Image (cartoon, rainbow, N blue to C red):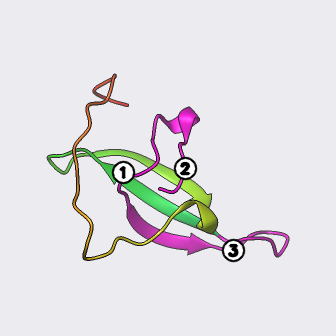
Amino acid sequence: LREDLASDKLQQGDVATLVDFVPHPHHGERGCVLEVFNAVGESLRVVVVRESQIEPLTSNELLMVRHIAEPDM
């Protein structure tokens, strides 16, 4: 993620899996459906964000783990 999503308890830099692209109903910026998993692969949440709020991972990045306040998010 390029920015925090406070309402979803997600932070800039969190990694999610792109599920699908969603066209904007009024020809605006398209959306992206993302699924967020915990460190052991359990699905925590599915969110829809603007395409500009995400960026692809690159080969020179290292994944990190952060603790979440609530186990079920």
Name the residue: 32% across, 75% down: 58
What is the secondary structure assignment of the residue under circle 2?
loop
Q: Farthest left residue?
A: 40
User: How far is disc 2 from disc 1 in space, using C-alphas?
Assistant: 15 Å
Q: How far apart are the alpha carbons under marks 3 and 2?
A: 21 Å
Task: Name the residue that disc number 1 marks.
Answer: 36
The quarter of the picture where residue 57 lies is bottom left
Q: Main secondary structure of the magenta part?
A: loop
- The residue lying at 26 percent from left, 37 percent from top is 66
Q: Is residue 5 above or below residue 73?
A: below
Q: Determine whether the residue tagged by mark 3 lies in a helix, strand or loop.
A: loop
Please say if 17 is above or below 13: below
How many dots with numbers? 3
Q: Where does the C terminus fall, quadrant-wise?
A: top left
The residues tagged by marks 1 and 3 sit, at their Cα atoms, a distance apart of 21 Å
The residue beneath circle 3 is 23
Amino acid on which disc 3 is placed: Pro
How far across and down, in percent of the image, does residue 67 sit? Answer: 26, 31
Front position among marks 3 and 2: 2
* Relative to 34, 62 lies left or right: left
Nearer to me, 63 or 18 = 63
Instruction: Give residue 59's quadrant in the image.
Output: bottom left
Along the polypeptide, which appears first: circle 2 or circle 1? 2
Q: Relative to 16, does residue 37 appear above or below in the rendering? A: above
Frontmost of labels 2 and 1 is 2
The kind of residue on which mark 1 rests is Val
Magenta stretch in the rendered image: 1-30
Location of residue 69 by image quarter = top left
Residue beneath the point at 33% across and 23% down: 70
Q: Which mark is residue 3?
A: 2
13 is within the stretch colored magenta: yes
